Amino acid sequence: MDCLEGMRKCLEDKSVDVVVTSPPYNIGIKYNKYNDTIPRNHYLNWIEDVGLEIRRVLKDEGSFFLNMGHKPSDPWVPWEVAFRLKKYFVLQNVIIWVKSIAIQKNDTGNYPSISGDIAVGHFKPINGKRFLNSNYEYIFHFTKSGKVELDRLGIGVPYQDKTNIGRWNSATKDLRCRGDTWFIPYETIRSREKERPHPSTFPPKLPEMCIRLHGLNKVNLVLDPFIGIGNTALACIRLGLDWIGFEIDEYYADITEKRVKEYLLRSVENDR
Ligand SMILES: C[S@@+](CC[C@H](N)C(=O)[O-])C[C@H]1O[C@@H](n2cnc3c(N)ncnc32)[C@H](O)[C@@H]1O
């Protein structure tokens, strides 16, 4: 059902620990049913209504991770949305979801594990001479106070230089804060229709990292108001968490249900 209606009907005040979601971006993406080209002001007013409802259902110490993409000719929309939500939330972190990156060996200095130039990840290539291919999206991390404590090492990365362990007071294990650029590639697929039957998804690893950053041990319920084909649901099942999602398009909602069932079945079979 519609997420505003759904949140109002199904969710009590301050009942959700983490919201992870990617709404329509209003950049003309061709969904099965939803029209992604509504007048910008109308769109921003609607997003603001959704934000207010999310504020109602989110716990005071909760986290709201909002993934927003753009198109090269319309780069402002993520920030226009973030600016509207400033009314109701503090922008605690801005994370860049890197989908693809090229690294030249010469630029890396002394990293023995890097043996040559690297170009990894997938992106939608564009034609023309004005714009660069867009290889990233934003993840805005909103909270009510701006003071929510996070589990930074929950998504930490091992030190390259192991002598750092013990050198800093904070470095008691072989993990450091990952920072605010996250490389999360899409899986390689052979058939878009069969394997990714939705034009604008994030990989399940994205919600998984957001939830881990908030702190796994303080999460009971996760909400995705725009659940699409269920990648937040799959992340939650993997993490053993309860989730709730809304989707106006039955075609996508059915795929979510099917993927969740298949995932649960596979886990049961693997446990045998
Ligand atoms: C960017 S996609 C989310 C994709 C999702 N993150 C995934 O990985 O599958 C946005 C989704 O919001 C849905 N949608 C649009 N308006 C909605 C509304 N009012 N309530 C619930 N879902 C809506 C669209 O049908 C679309 O599937």
Image (cartoon, rainbow, N blue to C red):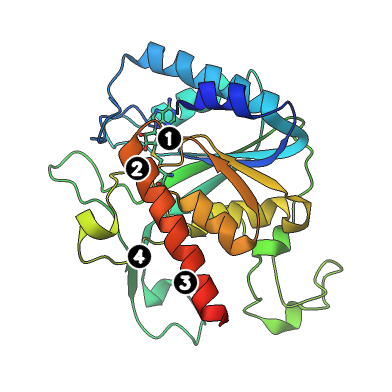
**What amino acid type should be assigned to the residue bearing mark 3?**
Arg
Most distant residue in the right direction: 169
Secondary structure, mark 2, is helix
Label 1 crowding class (10 Å Cα cut-off): few <14, some 14-19, many 20+? many
Residue 247: image tag: 1
Image quarter where ligand 1 lies = top left
Q: Nearer the viewer, residue 45 or 235?
A: 235
Mark 2–mark 3 Cα distance, whole angstroms, equals 21 Å
Q: Are marks 2 and 3 in contact (CB under 8 Å)?
A: no
First-in-chain label (2 vs 3): 2
Q: Which residue is mark 3?
A: 266
3 or 1: mark nearer the eye:
3
Look at the numbered discs 3 and 1 and tell me whether their residues touch, using CB distance below 8 Å. Answer: no
Q: Mark 2 — residue?
A: 252
Rendered location of residue 46, percent (x, y):
46, 17
From the viewer's side, name the closer residue of 215 and 192: 192
CB contact under 8 Å: marks 2 and 1: yes
Q: Nearer the viewer, residue 46 or 257?
A: 257
Return the disc, 1 or 4, that comes first in the chain's sequence: 4
C-alpha gap between disc 4 and disc 2: 19 Å
Callout 1: SS: loop
Left or right: residue 3 versus residue 87 is left
Disc 4 target residue? 187
| Up/down of 154 relative to 164, above or below | above
Q: Residue at x 31, y 40 (%)?
A: 251
